[in-house]
Amino acid sequence: MHAQNHPLYSIDRDIVDRLLSKHSPKDEDLVDLARLLTRYEGFPGANDLQADMLKILKLWNLSREMLNIRSRQIWGNGYRPGKEIDEVVGSGFDTSAGEAN
């Protein structure tokens, strides 16, 4: 079987490199690893990326099943990419702007 190049490889390589440097992953990191593992599952290529993702699981002391469970919990708790959970809570009303005399 011929190894293929994935169109998102360079972007995903940067993400995997960032994750390799994390010893205490945040929610975003866990979700990123779970989605990348799913993206490359069964993909005939990007072997270096796939091997590094398995290293990350070991580094974080997680199984694939545990990672998926935690990722589903994170999404269930309101996680959205690019937003911290705290950012989506509250009215957004700014009391410091233009108070009446």
Image: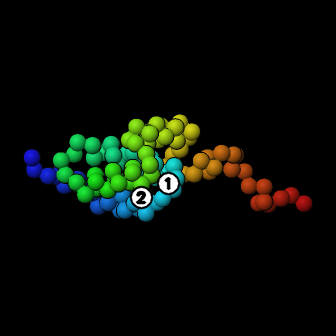
**Residue 18 % position (x, y):** 41, 62
Foreground residue among 48 and 94: 48
Mark 1 or mark 2, earlier in chain: 2
Q: Residue at x 78, y 55 (%)?
A: 95
Residue that appears at 14% across and 52% down:
3
Residue type (three-letter) at the residue carrying disc 1? Pro
**Dot 2: within a 10 Å radius of its alpha carbon, few (fewer than 14), some, or many (20 or more) residues?**
many
| Element type at mark 2 | helix
Q: Looking at the picture, how far across and down is residue 85, in whole percent?
A: 59, 47
The reply to whether residue 76 is visible in this rendering is yes
Q: Is residue 32 left or right of residue 98?
A: left
**In x, y percent, where is residue 99?**
83, 59
Q: Please give the residue where the numbered disc 2 appears in the rendered image.
A: 19
Q: Tell whether 6 sits left or right of 67.
A: left
User: Eyeballing the image, is 75 above or below 8?
Assistant: above
Q: Is residue 33 above or below residue 15?
A: above
Measure the alpha-carbon separation of dots 1 and 2: 8 Å
Q: Which residue is mark 1?
A: 25
Q: Is residue 93 left or right of residue 4?
A: right
Marks 1 and 2 in Cβ contact (< 8 Å): yes
Q: Position of residue 31 (x, y in %)?
A: 45, 47
